Image: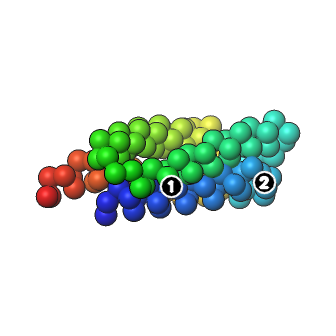
Amino acid sequence: MGSKLLFMLNAVVVLVLGVALVFVPEATLTQFGTETRVAELHMARFLGAALATLGLLLWFAKDASDEGVQRNIGFAMLGGTVLALFVTILGVAFNGVIRNFGWLVIVIEVAFGLGYVFVLFLQPRMK
């Protein structure tokens, strides 16, 4: 698996979630068992816009020809994925904010984290 495929997969996942949070935040948040008050819906839309932007950025970055640029984006995505995993674990385990499907978010974040570790550290050694 190369960075192009990983960027494409990650772009699709975050773009779909981002668009869902922007246009149907109540239905999306309900799937995770979170509150759907006005403040949560507004913040969900902000998060959705950020995720959609990230998805578009990753989609266009997949075609970058410079390996240095791909590597730097990979490091940024690895750092962001680790941070998101930490926040999700806090939300699931300690705060109880995410009650349903929290494990699914954790699995997806771990999978992408491992993908970025592979692309950044293991794949170059295999060549």
Q: Which residue is mark 1?
A: 59
Quick check: 23 left or right of 68?
right
Give residue 101's mark.
none
Residue 15 percent location from the top left of the image = 60, 55
Q: Name which residue lies at 74% across and 43% down.
A: 45
Choose between 26 and 32: the one closer to the eye.
Answer: 26
Q: Pick the residue in front: 39 or 15.
A: 15
Mark nearer the viewer, 2 or 1 = 1
Q: Position of residue 63 (x, y in %)?
A: 41, 55
* 113 and 6: which is toward the camera: 6
The disc, 2 or 1, on the residue closer to the chain's N-terminal end is: 2
Q: Amino acid at mark 2?
A: Phe
Q: Secondary structure at mark 1?
A: helix
42 sits left or right of 52 in the view:
right
63 in relation to 92, above or below: below
Question: Residue 23, labelled with which disc?
Answer: 2
Residue 73, located in which quarter of the rendered image? top left
Using the image, determine if residue 86 lies above or below residue 26: above
Residue at (53% x, 47% y) in the render: 57
Instruction: Name the quarter where the N terminus is drawn.
Output: bottom left
Residue type at mark 1: give it. Answer: Trp
Q: Residue furthest right?
A: 38
Alpha carbon separation for disc pair 2 and 1: 21 Å
Q: Residue at x 68, y 44 (%)?
A: 49
User: Which quarter shows the C terminus?
Assistant: bottom left
Q: Residue at x 63, y 49 (%)?
A: 52
Q: Give residue 115's position: percent from left, percent from top.
A: 35, 55
In the figure, is residue 3 to the left or right of 96? left
Can residue 20 be seen at all in this image of the molecule? yes
Q: Is residue 96 visible?
A: no
Q: Element at badge 2?
A: helix
